Image (cartoon, helix red, strand yellow):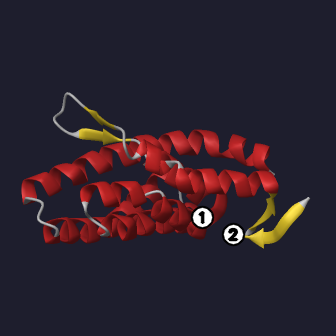
Amino acid sequence: MQLYENLFGIPFSFRSATMLAFLAVFPNILGMVVVPTPFGFKFHLFQVLVFLAALLYGKWGGALAGGFGSIYVAIALGNPFIIVGNILLGFFAGLFAKRMHVVLAVLAAFAIQVPWLYFTDLLVGMPEPVVRGVIVALLFSNVVWALAAATIYKRIGKVIQ
């Protein structure tokens, strides 16, 4: 049974709506988990769900997951600009993924997000070396999670239709 026809550019079923809701909310949980690396930066986990939403539901699904999925981190860090930055990341990842490989799409989306991230993190008082470290950590984790999302999104797409 279809709930909505062609919402986000795809036929939408109850399973698909449930998956989108999960992808929009669960990044808040993953946003609580940051793994330190031996390279001196912290590995972020939430992006995999934003990228899955972008691949499965396009630019608006990516934007939705990026925005709603960033609420916890934005509140915890006192930085509401994080929400807009992740909306940009999800939106452009979904937009570019229609035209290029997932990793390249994510890197292009991140290139758009970085100026926003850089200036708004400075605006909320983060020291510049910390901001640069966050950018490096996000770059690394974005590539890893883009590869993971590229590997599994087609299987998930088959299950939710």
**Which residue appears at 64% of the width and 45% of the height?**
153
Q: Position of residue 61 (x, y in %)?
A: 60, 64
Q: Whole-Å distance between the Cαs marked 1 and 2?
A: 7 Å
- Which element carries disc 2, helix, strand or loop? loop
Answer whether residue 51 is visible to the viewer in this image.
Answer: no
Judging depth in this view, the residue of 79 and 151 nearest the camera is 79
- Left/right placement of residue 61 relative to residue 7 reads left
**Which residue appears at 38% of the width and 66% of the height?**
83
Q: Quadrant of residue 2?
A: bottom right
Q: Disc number at residue 126?
A: none
Answer whether residue 89 is visible to the viewer in this image.
Answer: yes
Above-or-below relation of 139 to 119:
above
The residue singled out by tag 2 in the image is 8
**Which residue appears at 45% of the width and 50% of the height?**
28
Q: Residue furthest right?
A: 1
Q: Are marks 1 and 2 in contact (CB under 8 Å)?
A: yes
User: Within 10 angstroms of label 2, few (less than 14), some, or many (20 or more) residues?
Assistant: some
Mark 1: amino acid: Gly
- Which element carries disc 1, helix, strand or loop? helix
Q: Position of residue 154 (x, y in %)?
A: 69, 45
Q: Earlier in the sequence, mark 1 or mark 2?
A: 2
The residue singled out by tag 1 in the image is 61
Above-or-below relation of 126 to 145:
below
Q: Position of residue 54 (x, y in %)?
A: 57, 59
Mark 2: amino acid: Phe
**Which residue appears at 57% of the width and 68% of the height?**
59
